[in-house]
Amino acid sequence: MDFLISSFAAALRLIGSLSPDVVDAVRTSLSVSAGATLFAALFGIPVGLAVGLSDFRLKGFAVTALNTLMAVPTVVVGLLVYGFLSRQGPLGALGLLFSPTAIVIGGTLLASPIVANYTLASVRGADARILPTALTLGAGPFRAVITLVGEIRFGVFAAVIAGFGRVVSEVGVAMMLGGNIRGYTRTMTTAIALETSKGEFSFGMALGIVLMTVALIVNLFLSLLQRR
Amino acid sequence: MTELYRLRSVTKRYGANVAVDIEALTIAAGRLYTLTGANGAGKSTLLGILAFLLPPTTGEIFYAGERIDWKSDIARRRRKVTLLHQSPYLFGGTVFRNVAYGLLARGSAGKIADQAVDRALATVGLDRFRDRDARKLSGGEAQRVAMARALVLKPEVLLLDEPLANIDRETTGLLETVIASLPAQGTTVVMTTHEPDRSGRLNGGSIVLEGGKVAHADL
């Protein structure tokens, strides 16, 4: 127990002293997660809207596929993107492997199904009168959908935040595609894994506290939105 | 009598269920019609078709002499017709935002739109409601806002789905007066109701639906 308490105290000191390694890992984590979330929103929101608002023959299959993609292990996504970005892969010439961009690509693939599914759920839960009302008042199809998005905006925000939560807390993609390079691609999660394995438990704990704080803020915001 | 709508062999099916099956129906411009029938007779479905929101499964619809092409120019057609639901949906935000919505969708904004909104709200007795939160209105007030939102567009056709259900007598009287005045302003009105004597009171024609078919039409 003394070990845990002294590690916790050391972790708080590391956070308080703004240790450069801690700050770097936090900054990298937040920036790649924000980038991945942005691209996941740009892709996932339209997909969720399209699946939710249109009727097509394979709609049931599309919904099942989106649900399944939410459960894909991060290391599988990492493996897939690694295959594309590695030197022998089709995109190897771009030299993106072990860069923050690679983590953003992997994170986008991880978060997009979550954003799409949450958006789809919001569309399904939306008042069925919204679109006919907008259309009968003279809105074209695009404006009517924008109106719908405005009416379900809290659900869409929740979708984006859930996507961010997924990316910021994962370790597989960041480790495999970022390579855990100090000061460059080392995120909070990969740093925790590395430092703990090196016996630097208090350092790992410091990042764990920051990560938990970020997760707490994200979830508080999410539950706040879901209550609206 | 100027013909506005002409329906020819129009059906609307939902799976095996035939909601509407109309061999022929003509609706004249500038008149008021009540549309009656039991629950499930197809009244709301017919209004959805007339509002160009529900494409018929089969048949043809002519509007102002032109055959409706549901694939190309339907958004333009919709701007001539406004449907007011029995339980209208009000968008989040102010009463003004709701009433101005259709004007903004048509690219109309600024002082003229502001004045049009104020006039429409005054017509339904809500001139002081402009900045109120639309989601905090009573049922009758919401119905009147929805009516103002339709009136401000000066549509060629106003389709009303049970507009006087579930509202108090005072509001009913006000809305009846507003509705009755519309044909004189050039707006054709088709209104569903469960009260067959309403067409006499409103000095209009009547259409009776039974099982999706026109059982009687006094046009």
Image (cartoon, helix red, strand yellow):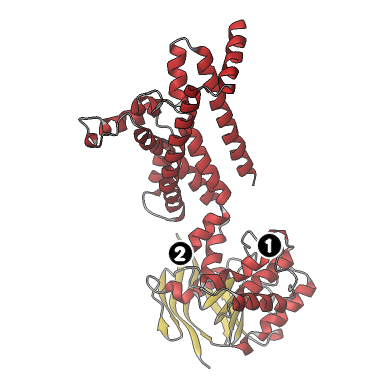
Q: Is residue A159 above or below residue B169?
A: above
Q: Is residue A202 above or below residue A125?
A: above
Q: Is residue A64 left or right of residue A160?
A: left
The alpha-carbon separation of the residues under discs 2 and 1 comes to 24 Å
In the image shown, does A2 or B81 lie closer to the viewer? A2
Q: Position of residue A178 (x, y in %)?
A: 36, 28
The total of numbered circles placed on residues is 2
User: Three-letter amino acid code at disc 2?
Assistant: Pro
The residue pinned by badge 1 equals: B134
Q: Position of residue A8 (x, y in %)?
A: 60, 15
The residue pinned by badge 2 equals: A141
Is residue B166 visible to us here? no
User: Three-letter amino acid code at disc 1?
Assistant: Ala
The image quarter in which residue A62 lies: top left
Q: Is residue B208 left or right of residue A38?
A: right
Write the residue at 49% across / 24% down. A20
Q: Secondary structure at mark 1?
A: helix
Q: Secondary structure at mark 2?
A: helix
Q: Position of residue B161 (x, y in %)?
A: 62, 71
Is residue A88 visible to us here? yes
Q: Residues within 10 Å of mark 2 (few under 14, many from 20)?
A: few
Q: Is residue A56 left or right of residue A155?
A: left
Write the residue at 63% across / 70% down. B99
Q: Chain of mark 1?
A: B
Q: Position of residue A95 (x, y in %)?
A: 26, 34
In the rendered image, the residue lying farthest to the bottom is: B1
In the rendered image, the residue lying farthest to the top is: A2
Q: Which mark is residue A189?
A: none
Q: Is residue A32 left or right of residue B2?
A: left
Q: Is residue B73 above or below residue A127?
A: below
In the image shown, does A23 or B13 lie closer to the viewer? A23
